[in-house]
């Protein structure tokens, strides 16, 4: 494991000891799952819209290079300036150059997971630019100097009391209150002042329509619309996979996204952004920039199986139903994208050397696959990445970095034993006689017994018991 690897096991062990955290997640997840189930109570309708949504995403990915060129052409025709970034360093440099050109000192941000991937707030602060999160959940975690713990509900790990203490501590005019309406109003008053004076607004993109050059952004708080219309410059950042082919592809994906994410038939605001302010219009930015980020996605796209990772519409449903995520929370993953989707995306984006532990943060129960609105085969990809981590290759960065000679020898021995009936009988008889005497400190066995009871071997093998019953070996 490389020096820069993330220690998920250590972080998740610490999370499991935090009873407050576990209680907060349990309550939140139970609520989200039950509300989502109501939205998709009609199984036939669920299967139909799910199949449609998956086909929209598959069709878009099948034409991705063509659609990206079409998106750029139509955005440019609409007056949106398109920028391409291979890496997060390039994307940050593009954003900074726009800011410096307009002498920006204050940025308000709508919710954007790609900006989290870019670590944009920290980058801008290093260059003397204040970047303020305007989504309430993101604002809370920014005040707490923490990462989002969920891609839809960033502060889901905190309860009202914890947020009340945080506001009292970090907001100058705050009085302590656990009244949710008063807390929300306090945040709104702080943010309103910033919206009015911000030089630039930054947002994410839920979908970009190649056919029309339109950026689609869904949200509930109005902060997305404020961030994209009040400041004179709007910068939208998106991963290159967010493109869809046609305007008619938007409604089914939005229907799946909002019902899966927040159990709403539709969000309060659906923004369709197609151009900067035109002559005679009373609001809107004078400039719109679209930064399209690759950051390893081209490599993912090149592999037919791994490409399915890019279908994701970022609804977070896989997290809400994952038995691992719901126990340890998002911070244990130490990544912008936690949970099942993060466990397959982050190793491909940042490399298995650094993120090779994440594909093992999975029980293979298949709950994420059954709930995914666009049918991503998450568990199959998880298995593929586990294999890539121990076998050198070119498909994924860092392939083979977790290879272990001892483990390889064990699997080789297992394969040879099961290929020979004689070897199998000898091995099982030996384990029946001596297996229970093996100390738990043995290499490999120690890895198992660190968190589990040592397996106990029966005194007689199944074959021996069968023979005693007069059943011959075949």
Image (spheres, rainbow, N blue to C red):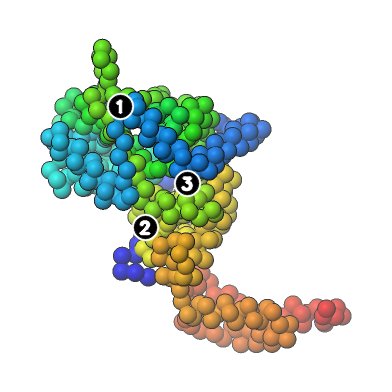
**Residue 267 found in image quarter:** top left
Q: Viewer-nearest of labels 1 and 2? A: 1
Return the x and y of residue 179 as percentages of the image width and height: 30, 29
The residue at the point 47 percent across, 46 percent down is: 310
Q: CA distance from mark 1 to mark 2?
A: 34 Å
Q: Residue furthest right?
A: 470
SS at mark 3 in the image: helix
Residue 257 appears in the rendering: yes
Q: Left of 459 or right of it: where is 79?
A: left
Residue 327 appears in the rendering: no
Return the x and y of residue 357 as percentages of the image width and height: 42, 63
- Mark 1, Cα crowd under 10 Å, few <14 / some 14-19 / many 20+, is some
**Residue 135 found in image quarter:** top left
Q: Viewer-nearest of labels 1 and 3? A: 1
The residue at the point 41 percent across, 38 percent down is: 69
Total tally of numbered discs in the picture? 3
Residue nearest the viewer, comparing 36 with 45: 45
Residue nearest the viewer, comparing 474 with 38: 474
**Residues under numbered marks 1 and 2 in contact, where contact means CB atoms less than 8 Å apart:** no
Q: Is residue 402 above or below residue 473?
A: above
Where is mark 3, residue-wise? Answer: 310
**Residues under numbered marks 1 and 3 in contact, where contact means CB atoms less than 8 Å apart:** no
Return the x and y of residue 83 as percentages of the image width and height: 30, 40
The residue at the point 45 percent across, 64 percent down is: 394
Where is mark 2, residue-wise? Answer: 350
Where is mark 1, residue-wise? Answer: 79
SS at mark 2 in the image: helix
Residue nearest the viewer, comparing 38 with 416: 416
SS at mark 1 in the image: loop
Q: CA distance from mark 1 to mark 3?
A: 28 Å
Label located before the other in sequence (1 or 2): 1
Label located before the other in sequence (1 or 3): 1
């Amino acid at each position: 494991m490389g020096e820069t690897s993330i220690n998920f096991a250590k972080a998740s062990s610490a999370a499991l000891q935090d009873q407050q955290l576990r209680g907060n997640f349990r309550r939140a997840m139970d609520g989200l799952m039950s509300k989502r189930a109501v939205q998709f109570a009609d199984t036939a309708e669920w299967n139909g819209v799910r199949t449609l949504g998956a086909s929209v995403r598959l069709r878009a990915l099948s034409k991705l290079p063509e659609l990206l060129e079409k998106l750029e052409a139509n955005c440019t025709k609409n007056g949106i300036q398109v920028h391409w970034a291979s890496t997060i360093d390039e994307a940050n440099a593009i954003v900074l150059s726009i800011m410096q050109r307009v002498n920006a000192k204050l940025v308000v941000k709508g919710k954007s997971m790609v900006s989290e991937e870019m670590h944009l707030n920290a980058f801008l602060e290093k260059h003397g630019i204040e970047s303020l999160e305007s989504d309430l959940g993101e604002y809370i975690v920014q005040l707490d100097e923490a990462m989002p713990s969920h891609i839809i509900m960033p502060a889901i790990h905190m309860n009202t009391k914890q947020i009340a203490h945080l506001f009292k501590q970090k907001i100058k005019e705050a009085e302590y209150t656990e009244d949710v309406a008063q807390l929300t109003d306090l945040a709104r008053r702080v943010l309103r002042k910033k919206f009015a004076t911000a030089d630039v607004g930054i947002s994410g993109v839920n979908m970009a329509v190649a056919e029309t050059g339109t950026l689609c952004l869904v949200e509930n708080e109005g902060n997305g619309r404020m961030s994209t219309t009040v400041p004179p410059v709007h910068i939208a950042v998106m991963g290159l996979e967010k493109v869809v082919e046609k305007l008619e592809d938007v409604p089914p994906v939005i229907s799946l996204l909002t019902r899966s994410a927040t159990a709403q038939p539709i969000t309060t605001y659906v923004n369709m952004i197609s151009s900067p302010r035109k002559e005679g219009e009373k609001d809107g930015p004078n400039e719109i920039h679209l930064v399209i980020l690759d950051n390893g996605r081209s490599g993912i796209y090149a592999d037919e199986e791994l490409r399915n990772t890019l279908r994701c519409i970022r609804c977070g449903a896989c997290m809400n139903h994952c038995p691992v995520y719901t126990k340890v929370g998002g911070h244990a993953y130490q990544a912008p994208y936690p949970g099942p989707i993060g466990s397959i995306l982050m190793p491909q984006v940042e490399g298995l050397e650094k993120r090779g532990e994440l594909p093992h943060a999975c029980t293979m129960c298949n709950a994420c696959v059954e709930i995914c609105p666009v049918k991503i085969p998450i568990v199959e990809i998880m298995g593929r990445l586990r294999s890539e981590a121990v076998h050198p290759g070119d498909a994924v960065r860092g392939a083979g970095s977790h290879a272990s000679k001892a483990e390889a020898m064990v699997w080789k021995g297992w394969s040879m034993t099961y290929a020979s009936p004689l070897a199998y009988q000898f091995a099982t008889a030996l384990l029946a006689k001596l297996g229970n005497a093996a100390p738990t400190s043995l290499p490999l066995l120690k890895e198992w017994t660190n968190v589990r009871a040592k397996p106990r071997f029966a005194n007689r093998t199944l074959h021996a018991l069968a023979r005693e019953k007069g059943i011959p070996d075949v």
